[in-house]
Image (cartoon, helix red, strand yellow):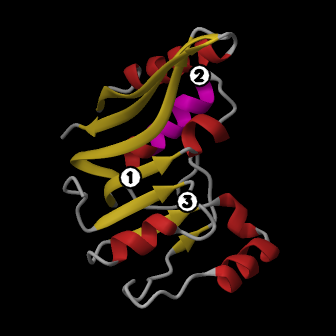
Amino acid sequence: LEDLGQVVIDLGSDKYEHISRQLAIHGIKVFSVNPQLLLPQVRHQAKADSPRAPDIAPWQARSVVAIGQHLPFPARFADSLISTMAVPLKLAKTFSEYYTAFSEIDRVLKPNRRAFIYPILQTTVLPESHDFELAIQAISALSHLEYSLEPMASYHNLNGHHVSYRLILYKLA
């Protein structure tokens, strides 16, 4: 669990909130952020389809309808933030969008804590190759964040070379 702490934000959670359910087993409070939960049919379908497996601890519903650029949490709220697929796919892929989202992550994280964002794709294919550079530039513009990139997968195809990373943001004191 990489020392996630007691309060985790799942930015861009799926409608079934799998991360929330799995971390609840370990006593971690997860706040699931998903803009699609605004839609009544999505909320209803998620409740109807929810697995009630006996090996899963009682799930704590802390769903929040929001987007990454406007997180409805106070400053220094979370011990960790996890985002799988949301940041690279849901942003408008401009410097401003990345900067705003990473600023919000910086704001809601407690000092000396981390955010885990994946996948971040670096590719030689245009225009996607520019997206990676914009994300890194946005992080670099924030003085309270440092980052590291951990390669997860690499492949070549007719369109070029692609590397998928896990981005780890470190909130400085």
- Residue at 28%, 45% (x, y): give it: 114
Q: Nearer the viewer, residue 26 or 87?
A: 26
- Amino acid type of the residue that numbered disc 3 sits on in the rendered structure: Ser
Give the residue at mark 3. Answer: 13
Per the rendering, the mark at residue 95 is 2
Q: Nearer the viewer, residue 65 or 119?
A: 119
Per the rendering, the mark at residue 57 is none
Question: As displayed, is residue 3 above or below residue 15?
Answer: above
In this rendering, which labeled residue sits more in front, label 1 or label 3? 3
Q: CA distance from mark 2 to mark 3?
A: 23 Å
Q: In terms of sequence position, does the residue under pointer 1 or pointer 2 come before the other?
A: 1
What is the x, y in percent for residue 23?
35, 70
Q: Considering the image in quadrants, where does the C terminus appear?
A: top left
- Amino acid type of the residue that numbered disc 2 sits on in the rendered structure: Phe
Callout 2 environment at 10 Å: few (<14), some (14 to 19), or many (20+)? Answer: some
What is the x, y in percent for residue 52?
52, 88
Q: For mark 2, give the secondary structure.
A: helix
Give the residue at mark 1. Answer: 81
